[in-house]
Image: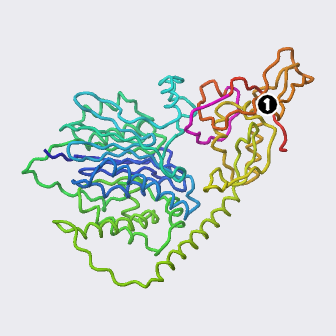
Amino acid sequence: MAYFLRFAARSDVGMVRAKNDDSAYVGRYLAVVADGMGGHAGGNIASASTVLDLVHLDRSHQRGDAGTELADEIQTANSLLSELVSTNPQLAGMGTTVTALLLNGDRLELAHIGDSRAYRLKNGVFEQITTDHTFVQRLIDEGRLRPEEADVHPHKNVLMRVLGDVDASPELDLQTLEVEPGERWLLCSDGLTAVLNDRMVEQIVRETPNLDECVNALVELTLAGGSPDNVTVAVIEVALTTGDEPEPELRPVLPSAREAAGEREASSGPADVSAAASEGPAEPAVRADLIRADLLSRPHLLVGAAALATETGQIPIVTQRSTERRAALMLTHKAQAPDGPLEEAPAPPVRRWLGPAFVTLGVLILLAVLGFGYTWTQTRFYVAAAGDRVAVYNGVPQTLGPIQLSHVYERTTIPVSNLPEFRRSQLEGGLPASDLQEAERIIEDLRGELRAVGCAPEGGPQATDGPSAEPTPGPSASASPKPTASPSASRSASPSASPSASAGATSTPRAQPSPSDAQTDPGAVTADCGGNLE
């Protein structure tokens, strides 16, 4: 028995969005939904690049382990995002979720990262198959937050895992599932689930036999509910191949690229940013010809930013990179004969000095790139913990082998252990600042939160910088002593903020918390109500 996928997909701009950062592809063997992030600079680029890097997997015969191949291709897509950022620093911070299904015989390979979702309707049971990689979902899993509280949690949109330029090898959720004819899958970005609850989604998927009508109903209801985000929906159905059925018609998106992308009117923002970051000829649409030819060779639907990039070239750096990869893959496929690989022609003689010369040139280029990269890192600042004190760092919070790319620029007297728990988790990853002035503003915000927590009462001990310092009663101390702040407060605290962890804290800019578990010192209290930079 052979299976294939029937499919429908649609992507639309949210009610308050200027452009569509979502992308999706569905074909006879592959379905992918990606929700880009990074705002004006690169959300659309991240999702479009990732989806276009995966579409060549849409074929009937997989080589080897299809699940491993899918995971490897997603990791490759992640590397390409890092490459784009390294050549275009204005794209720093962009990322994307990915939820992908790959049909291989009678099995579906599922790969997932982020908060886009995959639902399955099989044997009358409708269920969510993927798990959101969000901060609130982790709190729910640990029993520290009820599911009904997640929708109103202040950090409900904080992602713990995504593709992007931060992690060189992000962790993917991988599953292999057996398929049956007639089972239906829904892949969607969080723009859908932010407006429609699971009960309403299930009702539409169950009661709408036509896939196109199902997709349109889900998107229209989301937009009618005032969707604050872009919404992308793909519905697929597993079908059994019969020997006499005709090959389905190709479904090109070339005549309606903007409509497929969900763009209602021209928007100069994304095009300007991507065009400024692109390289090569001034006619980016020409570079998409090879991608279009490859896509039109198979039945498919391409929607969102990926459709706009492919058909109009408005995101030229995506079409340029994807064209290079697609050309290499197509040449590789053409080199394969029906009965196996062709015999390789003997290689022409090569001068012996060419090898060492290329190696030397490569080393010199690498050293130049590393030197330029290190120089650039020293123009950046961030705020993080230095022992049990908050400090301003010059550089970026990463290492390059044995080389530390940052150092303490200024150290404050603000104790980390006395800050709200979610603030401590943010400090673990570092609070980025564009310059020293912004870093000092972040310090002032933290000092304000420290004052909001309150000083040690009159008569109580006050913390000193050393672990063996004796408590000294202050003029306003009370008779009730409190423990001193531990200088060993963990710098590896992860975001574990409960609804009461940040009570009384003033509003500060949000940052993505570390995915590690929170480790705090229960005995730590306010030892210093803020101080000047040392």
Of the 4 image quadrants, the one containing the C terminus is: top right
Q: Residue at x 79, y 20 (%)?
A: 482
In which quarter of the view is residue 14 placed?
top left
Determine whether 327 is above or below 525 in the image: below
Q: Residue furthest left?
A: 244
Name the residue carrying label 1. Answer: 451
Is residue 290 found left or right of 169 in the rendered image? left
Based on the picture, tell me whether residue 228 belongs to the magenta stretch.
Answer: no
Q: Residue at x 69, y 50 (%)?
A: 433
Is residue 180 found left or right of 168 in the rendered image? left
In which quarter of the view is residue 426 placed?
top right
Indicate the position of residue 68 as horizontal and vertical percent values: 34, 49
Residue type pointed to by label 1: Arg
Helix, strand or loop at mark 1 = helix
Of the 4 image quadrants, the one containing the N terminus is: top left
Q: Residue furthest right?
A: 475
Indicate the position of residue 310 as horizontal and vertical percent values: 37, 62
Indicate the position of residue 75 as horizontal and vertical percent values: 43, 52
Looking at the picture, tell me which residue is in the foreground, 465 or 285.
Answer: 465
* The residue stretch that appears in magenta: 503-520
Determine whether 248 is above or below 144 in the image: below
